[in-house]
Amino acid sequence: MAKGLLAVVILVLGALMTSELVRAQSRERGGEQIVKQQCIKCHGTGVNGAPKIDDRAAWSKRMGQGLQATVASAIKGHGKMPARGGIADLSDTELRAAILYMFYPGAASAGSAAAAPAVPADPHRKVVDGMEVFLGVAPAGKGSYHISISLRDAASQAQIKDAVVEARVANALGGSTKKLEAKTFDGAAGYVNDFRMEGRDAYTITAQIRRKGAARPSEVKFEFKP
């Protein structure tokens, strides 16, 4: 398994466990149920270019802007796929569970069977100064990765589109600092740039976020191993 793909798998595994626990508490439909009821019609065989179920390489490309952006795209509808996959009463949580199941159905099944003592922390999500900060990492060529930061207001869940975001990606041997460019991916806002991350050493990704009108920037740190 490619190193970049492995990183996405690790991210999704944590999200899968969280999704199953939330579903158990709220009695919402599970990802497997939704996929077998509806999504399999296209994602089972790849109709109209839909990424096939369990094709993690194909799904990783769709998640280049992060899981939240992928969910937002499915809510709105993408290409020939209707909004919410054609199930009007599908909640955001249910839709997220379906995407996670299609990315890695084996892990979803294992997560459902295992009893976890507590909801695990998502290593790619931080909360700081009233913001939810989501990290997305996707391969962009040999030794290069797309780094994306998505922001939401923790109280209203509204996307934050007018921030200035800078990221430093570094390990013990050094690193680089770049401004992230604001971009919109199928209605989901994010801040993106490419960074070199070579070798097997862990990197610290430090994001400096300045919201409009804020007296000082907010800072969050993530750990990532290529």
Image (cartoon, helix red, strand yellow):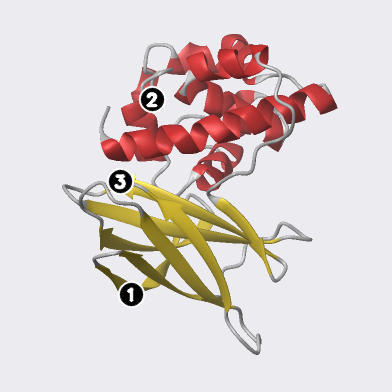
Q: Which residue is mark 3?
A: 226
Classify mark 3: residues with Cα within 10 Å, few (<14), some (14-19) or many (20+): many
Left or right relative to 77: residue 65: left
What whole-number distance in Å separates the C-alpha atoms at marks 1 and 3?
18 Å
Residue 98, placed above or below residue 35: below
Which comes before the other along the chain, label 1 or label 3? 1
Q: Which residue is mark 2?
A: 51
Mark 2 falls on what kind of element?
loop
What whole-number distance in Å separates the C-alpha atoms at marks 2 and 3?
24 Å
Q: Quadrant of the N terminus?
A: top left
What residue type is disc 2 on?
Answer: Pro
Asked which quadrant contains residue 163, the reply is: bottom right
What whole-number distance in Å separates the C-alpha atoms at marks 1 and 2?
34 Å
What residue type is disc 1 on?
Answer: Thr
Residue at the (52%, 30%) spot, across then down: 13
What residue type is disc 3 on?
Answer: Pro
Q: Which residue is mark 1?
A: 177
